[in-house]
Amino acid sequence: MKILVINAGSSSLKYQLLDMDDESVIAKGNCDRIGIGGHIKHSTYDGREVDVDCDFPTHTEAFEKLVEVLTSGDAAVIKSMDEVNAVGHRVVHGGEVYNKTILVTDEVIKQIEDLKDLAPIHNPPNATAIRACRKVFPASTPQVAVFDTAFHQTMPEKAYMFGLPYECYEKYGIRKYGFHGTSHRFVSQALADAMGKDIKDLKIVSCHLGNGSSITAVEGGKSIDTTMGFTPLDGVIMGTRSGCVDASAVTFIQNKMGLSPNETSDLLNKKSGFLGVSGVSSDARDLGAAAADGNKRAKLALEMLRYEIKKYIGSYAAVMNGLDAVLFTGGIGENSDDLREDVCSNMEYLGIKLDKSVNKGLHGKLVKISAPDSKVEVWVVPTNEELLIARDTKALVEGK
């Protein structure tokens, strides 16, 4: 079975075509600059490439080009789209409506659009891309929506509710939704498989760390709490996002700086985090280099992230009444050995003891990095959201 995975943004269309017999990637690429020109970069499993400028007025033209490069020319990998058995779409927000993967219908697309108030940047282009895909692909090809928020729908009410007037939840849906759910679900199961244990018997803290970061308490394979909240802004400090901030500090800044709600959102989401604290960059690698050169603010931003991760590990261990494993994933989690060492230092009271020799220099590999006598196992687990979307799509189409 061949499955095409789509991850669409307002001006981009990332894709992977997977052979689910061995879960290998046949081809992948990105159509970007949609609506403002157009460009496609496409590569195959055996190294053939397409890298050209195109005319992409809308997502429809991007999908037409995607079909073209998959089926014709020097980088073709299939003879026709009839060989694609199903399409899996990543959708950011399912609200409280969707707690699992679902087959796409006109009603589902409308519901995705209706949730635009909860994810104004993501859900409208998600719906637009699904419509364009259905327009270009054969009607007989099943299409599936996999929601980033679905994994966190198992959180108990006491974890997802805010201490606001209850009518804010009833009227406007103000609550914690959580994000990165597809990644957290993939890596927690991959960890259980690597440990040779049933995920139902494990208490895991999953640390997805990148330009956007979130930490999730996974008990028995289910999310019971997570750091991102109503939006991806909450939780730990990130590339340009502030993370958790006292709401009164936000209103104070609004008054002092004369900011509108949209300008305040821009400040918190695009001008804060690593960038705002350091004044150097939103990239942790740049901060590391700056800190090594003596930049105190860059060092502070890195220390803040490490402190907050450690704090959440401890609090989630308390919530779960124990801890079996901690995992690191995402661009920073998989590649920053110094962050993993700093986070795990002075955590012996909790049963965490790192094997520094194994951790040192480890990048993007599935490896246990805790010491043999560590009561809590610590792992690096590379994430693969596209593969999970493909697996979900295959299971739904096959009725499993």
Image (cartoon, helix red, strand yellow):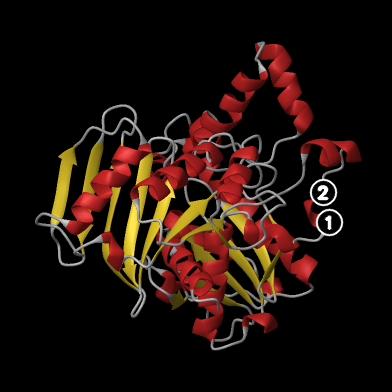
Work out whether 381 lies above or below 371: above
Residue 157: numbered disc: 1
Q: Say few, some or many: other residues with alpha carbon within 10 Å of mark 1 (under 14 / 14 to 19 / 20 or more).
A: few
Lateral position of residue 11 relative to residue 123, left or right: left
Work out whether 381 lies above or below 298: below
* Residue 165 visible in the picture: no
The residue to which callout 2 is attached is 161
CA–CA distance in space, label 2 to label 1: 6 Å
At horizontal 51% and vertical 36% (from top left) the residue drawn is 240
Work out whether 113 lies above or below 258: below
At horizontal 59% and vertical 87% (from top left) the residue drawn is 197
Q: Say few, some or many: other residues with alpha carbon within 10 Å of mark 2 (under 14 / 14 to 19 / 20 or more).
A: some
The quarter of the displayed image where residue 141 is located: bottom left
Q: Looking at the picture, how far across and down is residue 305, in whole percent?
A: 57, 48
Q: Looking at the picture, how far across and down is residue 31, in whole percent?
A: 29, 43
Lateral position of residue 302 relative to residue 384, left or right: right
